[in-house]
């Protein structure tokens, strides 16, 4: 079965640079979530989208923005990168917000900021 | 705010024995409780979930129990095997509202001794 796809899988950036992470949800899934996971930490919710509209917002810095496109894929844009932004970034998708549907995670993008 | 506490943080059991991980949640409106297994550097994988209208759910060697009154839920793994070694996260979510995000516990590192 098709899973969530994330690209790139690895990304190395310098401080103050920008980065764009992409997420392609499972086919027919209309909800996308972004999580940030630091070393030894639990995943922290950043932001979610349902039917191309932002549905919830967590601990996402103002330097980050995200959107969901008409084909339901999502992009997380990160500007003015800081060393502390180094982490695993996961995207998850589900079928319908508000319906207790499971969230399935992508393989993640490992971002390293030097 | 919403919080999920998870215990223990590390757990070592002999192969073939049972493992139990316990979680408590603070938001009484939570009604969906997934459990994720995460191997080092890989994505969280959904292994079982339970909804608030159910007290117990079992899938082969894995079972989850929920006590809504006490706001406790637990993961039970029986006949543990080496491949069960991983970090396990409990989580809580309250769909049917704008807050559809998953709140994760801090994780339990489970080690299976041969």
Image (cartoon, coloured by chain):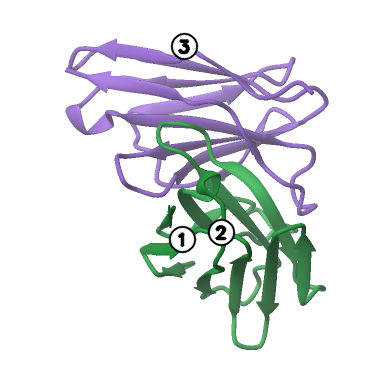
Chain colours: A purple, B green
In contact (CB < 8 Å): disc 2 and disc 3: no
In space, the residues marked 1 and 2 are separated at their CA atoms by 6 Å
Residue nearest the viewer, comparing B8 with A35: B8
Displayed quadrant of residue A87? top left
In contact (CB < 8 Å): disc 1 and disc 2: yes
* Residue B66 percent across, percent down from the top left: 68, 76
Picture layout, residue B34 above or below residue A15: below
The chain under label 2 reads B
Please tell me the numbered disc located at residue B91.
2
* Residue B57 percent across, percent down from the top left: 78, 67
Q: Is residue B42 visible?
A: yes
Q: Crowdedness of circle 3 by 10 Å Cα count: few (<14), some, many (20+)?
A: some
Q: Which residue is mark 1?
A: B105
Q: Which residue is mark 3?
A: A8
First in residue order: circle 1 vs circle 2: 2
In space, the residues marked 2 and 3 are separated at their CA atoms by 27 Å
């Amino acid at each position: 079965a098709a899973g969530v796809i994330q690209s790139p899988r690895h990304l190395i950036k310098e401080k103050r640079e920008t980065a764009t992470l992409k997420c392609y949800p499972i086919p027919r899934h209309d909800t996308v979530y972004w999580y940030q996971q630091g070393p030894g930490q639990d995943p922290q919710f950043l932001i979610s989208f349902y039917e191309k509209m932002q549905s919830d917002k967590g601990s996402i810095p103002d330097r980050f923005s995200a959107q969901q496109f008409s084909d339901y894929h999502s992009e997380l844009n990160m500007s003015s990168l800081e060393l502390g932004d180094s982490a695993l970034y996961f995207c998850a998708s589900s079928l319908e917000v508000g319906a207790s549907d499971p969230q399935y995670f992508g393989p993640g993008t490992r971002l390293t900021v030097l | 705010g919403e919080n999920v506490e998870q215990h223990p943080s590390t757990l070592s059991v002999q192969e073939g024995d049972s493992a139990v991980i316990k979680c408590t949640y603070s938001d009484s409106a939570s009604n969906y409780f997934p459990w994720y297994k995460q191997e080092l550097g890989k994505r969280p994988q959904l292994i079982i979930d339970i909804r608030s209208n159910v007290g117990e759910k079992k899938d082969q060697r894995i079972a989850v129990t929920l006590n809504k009154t006490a706001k406790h839920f637990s993961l039970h793994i029986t006949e543990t095997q080496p491949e069960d070694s991983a970090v396990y996260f409990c989580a809580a979510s309250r769909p049917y509202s704008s807050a559809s995000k998953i709140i994760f516990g801090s994780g339990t590192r489970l080690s299976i001794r041969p």
